[in-house]
Image: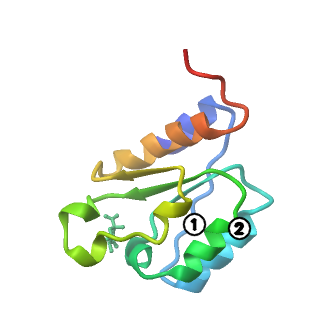
């Protein structure tokens, strides 16, 4: 579904999964010159990783933060995100559909996006 939505805007989707903080950071740096935007669910690293925050801060394209659940309805430790300050939008609690919405929002954020009426 994400790929279909992106394809309608002439874009492709590349998915990366890593259980390692450094793997996510490397993926962000590697994507700098080959992507126009990023959608990220960093799992628990959302709440702990200043390093991932720094990597995303140096990524010069729109970032959409996604969570399947709503971390704000969960334990207090999940209420802070290191990613949100560098994200153009945050989608939480929409389950898997959140990724499709993230693609739509990302497309709207691109410099080539037409202004909405
Ligand atoms: O690993 C996860 C999953 C999560 O990112 C989500 O998608 O709801 C929310 C995080 O708080 C949690 O640590």
Location of residue 52 in the rendering, given as x and y in whole percent from the top left corner: 57, 76
Query: Is 66 situated above or below 19?
Result: above
The residue that appears at 57% across and 66% down in the rendered structure is: 16
Image quadrant of residue 32?
Answer: bottom right
> Does residue 38 appear to the left or right of 94 in the view shown?
right
The residue that appears at 71% across and 67% down in the rendered structure is: 58
Query: Circle 1 sits on which residue?
Result: 16
* Viewer-nearest of discs 1 and 2: 2
The residue that appears at 56% across and 73% down in the rendered structure is: 53
Report ligand 1 position as a quadrant.
Answer: bottom left
Location of residue 42 in the rendering, given as x and y in whole percent from the top left corner: 46, 70
> Does residue 24 appear to the left or right of 101 in the view shown?
right
Location of residue 56 in the rendering, given as x and y in whole percent from the top left corner: 62, 67
Mark found first going from the N terminus, 1 or 2: 1
Disc 1: CA contacts within 10 A as few (<14), some (14-19) or many (>=20): few
Query: Circle 2 sits on which residue?
Result: 58
> Does residue 49 appear to the left or right of 107 in the view shown?
left
**Which secondary structure lies at badge 2?**
loop
Q: Give 49 or 80, whichever is nearer the viewer.
A: 80
Q: Give 5 or 86, whichever is nearer the viewer.
A: 86
**Which secondary structure lies at badge 1?**
loop
> Does residue 32 appear to the left or right of 20 in the view shown?
right
Disc 2: CA contacts within 10 A as few (<14), some (14-19) or many (>=20): few
The residue that appears at 60% across and 81% down in the rendered structure is: 23
Location of residue 15 in the rendering, given as x and y in whole percent from the top left corner: 57, 60
Q: What is the count of numbered marks?
A: 2
Query: Is 46 situated above or below 117?
Result: below
Q: Give 63 or 39, whichever is nearer the viewer.
A: 63
Instruction: Give the CA distance from mark 1 to mark 2.
Output: 19 Å
Residue 24 visible (yes or no) = no
Residue 60 visible (yes or no) = yes
């Amino acid at each position: 579904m994400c790929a279909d939505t992106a394809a309608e805007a002439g874009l492709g989707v590349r998915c990366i999964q890593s259980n390692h903080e450094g793997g996510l950071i490397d993926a962000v740096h590697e994507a700098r010159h080959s992507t126009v935007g990023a959608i990220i669910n960093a799992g628990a690293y959302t709440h702990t990783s200043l390093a991932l925050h720094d990597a995303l801060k140096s990524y010069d394209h729109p970032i959409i933060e996604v969570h399947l659940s709503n971390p704000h309805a969960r334990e207090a430790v999940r209420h802070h995100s290191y990613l949100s300050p560098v994200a153009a939008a945050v989608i939480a609690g929409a389950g898997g559909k959140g990724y499709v919405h993230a693609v739509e929002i990302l497309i709207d954020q691109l410099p080539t996006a037409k202004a909405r009426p």
